Image: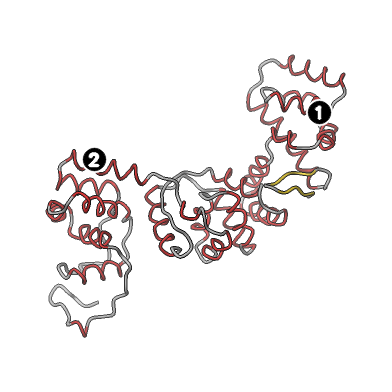
Amino acid sequence: MTDMSTAVPAKSAAPAIPQSNLSGAQKAAILLLKLGQAHSAKVLKLLGDQEVTQITAEIVKSQTIKKEDSDVTLTEFATLVVAGDHMQAGGFATAQQLLEASLGPQRALEIIENLKETMAKAPFEFLKNADPRQILNFLSSEHPQTIALVLAHVNPDIASMVVGGLPEELQREVSIRIATLDQTSPEVITLLEGQLEKRMSSVVKSQTNQAAADGVQTLIAILNRSDRATERSIFEGLEHHNEELADEVRSRMFVFEDIVTLDDRAVQLVLRQVDAKELATALKGVRAEVREKIMRNMSERAAQNLAEEITLLGAVKMKTVEEAQGAIVRVIRALEESGQVVVTRGTDEYVS
């Protein structure tokens, strides 16, 4: 690489620099980060409030800066020499320090708090009105972790259609990543969202930011709206990757209180295979409609005995109740697998 500290090459001899779609505020943020806090503070003092806010927003978003973007910006301004490949990281802390040095702590705090408030909206909202097929085409070439992060924050109905359209191997990997998602930094989501929205600007019209997802619950919501073939494929991948995780997802997919969605014949089939004491334990603390659904499908005498058993149990640990409910859910899943029970998924009913 040419040492630009001693000479700036003539325009005709300059190496080709990639074009950039950076906004003025983004270029200003790159320049200020390169200048460092002391010099940046002097520059910020010369700007109006609106310009300061716009540039600060871009500094907050600047977790990493591509070398080509840095080169384009520095060359365009022609006031700073490229000194290396890396730049100071951005983020709220850096932005606040720059503002404090130029505007004082009080004004800096006001701007940062205002930014946090405006940047704390639902993430990937710009995908809300997009056709799932467009989202599938758009995301299919992305890294599995990017696909997982996006699908974890969109409507489960849309996510299930997108997952169902992915190749089987990618489908499984994305599902595993969704199930194992931890809370993601809002700044990372903002950065990713900005990049994706730019590239998908011809498909949608909006913009936003942050949220944490329960990976397992998100995957369950997707699976509950997926067809059986997609579900089987995803579970095969989960089991291969992490059997415990697959069991957790499977047990949580049909929660015990969802038994009210089964028809009476299905409930009767389930009751024939469940121990009376386990059933009584499972019914501790549930909604009245769940108890009614169960007892309505028993003989009068059996229903009375069950009510007495529930009373005699007294206080029961929540863990014990959940274990009993989980055992009954496994019975329902087995009946579903054998085709004896009809389960409602999304807007469709089918026999597995």
* Residue for point 74% across, 18% down: 310
Along the viewing direction, whichever of 312 and 56 lies nearer the viewer = 56
Local SS, label 1: loop
Task: Tell me which label, 2 or 1, sits earlier in the chain.
Answer: 2
Q: Secondary structure at mark 2?
A: helix
Colouring method of the image:
secondary structure
- What residue appears at the point 49 percent right and 58 percent down from the top-left corner? 146
Give the residue at x 55% y 46%: 215
Residue 316 in the image, given as x and y percentages of width and height: 66, 20
Q: Is residue 86 above or below residue 315?
A: below
In screen coordinates, is 34 left or right of 155?
left
224 relative to 350 in the view: left or right = left
**Which image quarter is the N terminus in?**
bottom left
Which amino acid type is shown beneath numbered disc 2?
Glu
Up-down relation of residue 109 to residue 34 (above or below): above
From the top left corner, tell me how far across and down residue 304 is, in percent: 82, 17
Q: Are marks 2 and 1 in contact (CB under 8 Å)?
A: no
Q: Is residue 310 visible?
A: yes
In the picture provided, is 178 more to the left or to the right than 226? left
Tell me if residue 172 can be seen. no
The circle on residue 110 is 2
- How crowded pointer 2 is (Cα within 10 Å; few <14, some 14-19, many 20+) is rated as few
Check disc 1 and give the amino acid type.
Asp
Q: Is residue 342 left or right of residue 314?
A: right
To which residue does mark 1 refer? Answer: 275
Judge the density around disc 1: few (<14), some (14-19), many (≥20) Cα neighbours within 10 Å. Answer: few
